[in-house]
Image (spheres, rainbow, N blue to C red):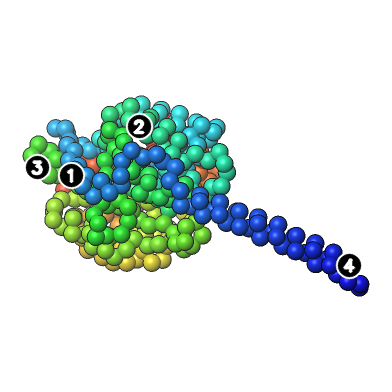
Amino acid sequence: MNKSKKKIITRIISIILAVVLLAVGTFGGYLLYRFNCDKSNAVNSYDSVYNANQVNLSTDDSGLFKILKITDTHFFDGVCENDEHTLNDMKAILDKTPCDLIVVTGDLVDGFNLKPTYDKFGAIDLFASLVEKYDTPWTFAPGNNDFEIDGSNEDIIAFMMQYKHFVCGNSKDIDGSMQFVIDVYSGDELVHSVAIMDSGARKPKAIGSYQPISENQANWLNDEVNARKVKTSVFFHMPTTAFQTAYDNGEAYKDFERYNTYPYDEIKDDYIFDDVIKDNEYITLLSCGHQHSNNMCSFYNGRYYQLSSVSGYSAGRNDFIVPSCTLTTINTLDDNPKTMYSFEQIRA
């Protein structure tokens, strides 16, 4: 091969390599931007969450306290066909389901999504604006997908703090973006508590293994519950290993559909949380989502383990799953953990 041909080949290879490196560099820079930017335009600082007022709610004379759980909606932009379907269902459910508290147990929005039309905070605004119309306190337990792109869980919470009925809280000395307790009173008497927890996500974002609930979070929960000495319902996103044990060995709640599409104990290290709280008699309900096509409610070891399938049409799911919300009714006058709860799947 003569020198002229070698120069041409070398030049072509150099051009190809330069194009590849430019493309990789551009895409890498775009990923760094998308992973780390905050598109929320939040008017509040997340730091104010640490100074949030203690949340106290009350029951009426019946002693009943109703919590509507929404989970795994995976909103994309709030206006696509699936999202419109979800929002219409949410309105229909909220119209016919009076409640005292609304809890969003994570994956409110889609996770790792590079489509330019993805609008995380636009979707959150449409959802929050709908919920606000019902004058009901509502809160958010972060999921594993919420923080993956276009803003962190802290950005989401700071954004949500602009809404009048949104309630939140956290402690600086523990892991996670949201940990606080809502106290429920009958008159002047504390009769029940509701704990909201951040159950972790992935490290690194979108591709790593799931993080378990940390030991300091579990200890925080124990301390808060033991200080109050009333029955407590706990809401978070991802199930712990005890959910599989409860599914296999617990007593299934009547008339609540049971699906075992995925292993309930997929996050193996979450046994740490289970070990820390297993003997706490005041923790009477653990309620979560995350596993889109799983569904269960079982009474085991003195408490209910309840996992709900998806609430949204943009969330991946098996064909037999119809999006729904879960209504948990707590009879705060009943001291028996097994009989004080009733659970109902609500569909539009």
Q: In the image, what residue type sits under mark 3? A: Glu
The picture quadrant where one finds residue 223 is bottom left
Classify mark 4: residues with Cα within 10 Å, few (<14), some (14-19) or many (20+).
few
Measured in 3D between alpha carbons, the distance from the residue under mark 3 to the one under mark 1, in whole angstroms, is 16 Å
Please say if the residues under marks 4 and 1 sit with CB atoms less than 8 Å apart. no
* Mark closer to the chain start, 2 or 1: 1
Name the element at disc 2. Answer: helix
Residue depicted at 43% across the width and 53% down the height = 144
Measured in 3D between alpha carbons, the distance from the residue under mark 4 to the one under mark 1, in whole angstroms, is 77 Å
Instruction: Name the front one of labels 3 and 4.
Output: 4
| Residue marked by disc 2 | 131
Task: Please tell me which residue lies in front, 323 or 221.
Answer: 221
* Mark closer to the chain start, 4 or 1: 4
Measured in 3D between alpha carbons, the distance from the residue under mark 3 to the one under mark 2, in whole angstroms, is 29 Å
Spot occupied by residue 237 in the image (x, y as percentages of width and height): 37, 51
Residue depicted at 25% across the width and 46% down the height = 48
Q: In the image, what residue type sits under mark 4? A: Lys
Please say if the residues under marks 3 and 4 sit with CB atoms less than 8 Å apart. no
Instruction: Name the front one of labels 3 and 1.
Output: 1
* Mark closer to the chain start, 3 or 4: 4
Spot occupied by residue 1 in the image (x, y as percentages of width and height): 91, 73
The picture quadrant where one finds residue 95 is top left
| Residue marked by disc 1 | 54
Measured in 3D between alpha carbons, the distance from the residue under mark 2 to the one under mark 1, in whole angstroms, is 21 Å
Residue depicted at 19% across the width and 43% down the height = 53
Spot occupied by residue 244 in the image (x, y as percentages of width and height): 39, 60
